[in-house]
Amino acid sequence: MKGHGECLCGSVVLELEYTSSEVAACHCSMCRNWGGGPMMAIDCSDSVKISDEANVVRYSSSEWAERGFCNKCGTHLFYYLKPANQYHIPIGLLQANNDFTFTHQIFIDEKPEYYDFKNETHNMTGAEVFAHFEEG
């Protein structure tokens, strides 16, 4: 499936492909600090084409990941997992009429008590996430 998204000011356009319509929520403290709440994203592997990389700031938030945003309007564009060459795109950025399904939550052990999602999802703690990436 193909998707399209752009930042608030239109300076950065993303063209992407994804094989699954599954949406994940990340509750880690870094995602919540970055966006003010959990990051809800779709996995796009390495199939993201960025229209104007000059307008993208890539912040190395850890040894294994970068977070990208527009240098003009600040829109969050992606979370990039370096070892897997894998982009995770915020679902709200996509301008698509596709049906997405909220299927899993990660870093569930870092989720604050003041919110909950009613959806039944597969949940993983931070330790389980890291163990999964070490196996794969």
Image: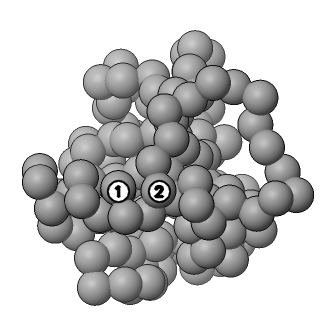
The answer to whether residue 51 of the structure is visible from this angle is no
Q: Does dot 1 land on a helix, a strand or a loop?
A: helix
- Place residue 7 in its image quadrant: bottom right
The answer to whether residue 124 of the structure is visible from this angle is yes
Q: Amino acid at mark 1?
A: Val
The residue under the point 58% across, 61% down is: 109
Q: Is residue 13 above or below residue 18?
A: below
Q: Which mark is residue 70?
A: none
Mark 1 — residue?
129
Q: Position of residue 40 (x, y in %)?
A: 60, 46
The residue under the point 51% across, 41% down is: 123
- Place residue 85 in its image quadrant: bottom left
Q: Position of residue 80 (x, y in %)?
A: 35, 64
Q: Position of residue 89 (x, y in %)?
A: 48, 49
Mark 2 — residue?
125
Q: Does dot 2 land on a helix, a strand or a loop?
A: loop
Q: Are marks 1 and 2 in contact (CB under 8 Å)?
A: yes
The residue under the point 32% across, 47% down is: 48
Q: Residue furthest right?
A: 114
Please state which of residues 135 and 66 is positioned toward the viewer in this rendering.
Answer: 135
The residue under the point 48% across, 33% down is: 122
Q: Residue furthest left?
A: 136
Please give left or right for residue 32 compared with residue 108 in the image. Answer: right
Please state which of residues 20 and 122 is positioned toward the viewer in this rendering.
Answer: 122
Q: Amino acid at mark 2?
A: Thr
The crowding category of the residue bearing disc 1, from other C-alpha atoms within 10 Å (few below 14, some 14 to 19, many at least 20), is few
Q: How are the residues colored?
A: one colour
Please give left or right for residue 122 compared with residue 136 in the image. Answer: right
Q: Quadrant of the N terminus?
A: top left
Q: Is residue 2 above or below residue 133?
A: above
The crowding category of the residue bearing disc 2, from other C-alpha atoms within 10 Å (few below 14, some 14 to 19, many at least 20), is some
CA gap, disc 1 to disc 2? 6 Å
